[in-house]
Image: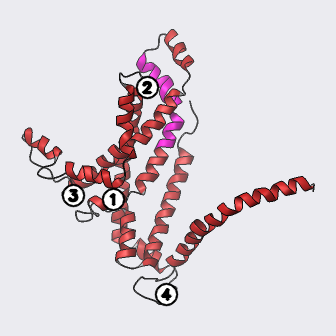
Amino acid sequence: MPAAPVRRRRTGLFFVLPFAVVFALFMVWPIVQGIWMSFTDQSLSLKDTEFVGFDNYAEAFGDPDVWSSLGNTVFFTVISVVPLVLLALCMALLVHTGLAGQWVWRLAFFAPYLLPVSVVTMIWQWLYQPDLGMFNQALDKVGIAPVGWLSDEAFAMWSMAALTVWWTIGFNFLLYLAALQSVPDTLYEAAALDGAGAWRRLFSITLPQLSRTTVLVVMLQVLASLKVFDQIYIMTKGGPNGSTRPILEYIYDVGFTGYRLGYASAISYLFFAIIVIVSIAQLRFMPRKEG
């Protein structure tokens, strides 16, 4: 083998080595350690650890709290992903059509995404206040009784979904806006010459050209919603009566409140398997080519 390619290969390994070491220490080793922990009864309150095999996984399958929290997670994913995709598309279309004061609209749509979760929850806690909150004040003016946005099981999860949509929709809006700006103008010009109206151009040109972006947005939002934790933990801590507790919060409660690290690890890896299956299903069954 010539000396030059060998030197280049060694040089490349030299540059990759620092990243590989960091990746192994902070990604590979924790994953391996977590898998091993899921087969033990490791606890924060006990020094001795015993190998229990698949007992933690068997317990997780029979744990009603696992299924209820997983159901809450799936419900939150459904009611948040749909508006996060459709509203982001509508917002991008409005701005792209040349709406007056575009920079104002772009700033208004994207600015909430830049806020940290602590600020977002503080704002919405005031909005959801039962007596002084803006939403109940508005209901009172039209003669509707106040609503327990965070204390009523019928409204709590919907309230968290509304918060999440307001907070994170700016990212999807930006993706759609960038995709719209990449659609060739010649397609619209040809359609106009053929007499196609605005709605015909929307459904025959714009939406097919955005199909790959829509796939990307849906995939990102499904994964993000399945991993919901911060805003719910800060605002409701899973209440009332566990109606908003997602699976990640239950894992946190089991591991760091109940001190059962081994059992929490088993639940987390079962949930990880579900995420992998969902991701593969999206890649397999959703269209990935532009029309």
**In-front residue for pair 133/244:** 133
Are there few (<14), some (14-19), or many (20+) residues within 10 Å of tag 1?
A: many
Which residues fall within the magenta stretch? 197-217
Q: Residue type at mark 3? A: Glu
- Viewer can see residue 87: no
Q: Residue type at mark 2? A: His
Which one is closest to the eye, mark 3 or mark 2? 2
Are there few (<14), some (14-19), or many (20+) residues within 10 Å of tag 4?
A: few
- Discs 2, 1 touching: Cβ within 8 Å: no
The residue located at (44%, 70%) in the rendering is 267
Residue 49 disc label: 4
Q: CA distance from mark 4 to mark 3?
A: 39 Å
| Percent x, y of residue 192 | 49, 12
Residue 120 part of the magenta-drawn span: no
Q: Residue furthest right?
A: 2
Colour style of the rendered protein structure: secondary structure
Query: Mark 4 vs mark 3: which is more N-terminal?
Result: 4
Which residue is under mark 3?
153
Q: Quadrant of the C terminus?
A: top right
Q: Quadrant of the N terminus?
A: bottom right
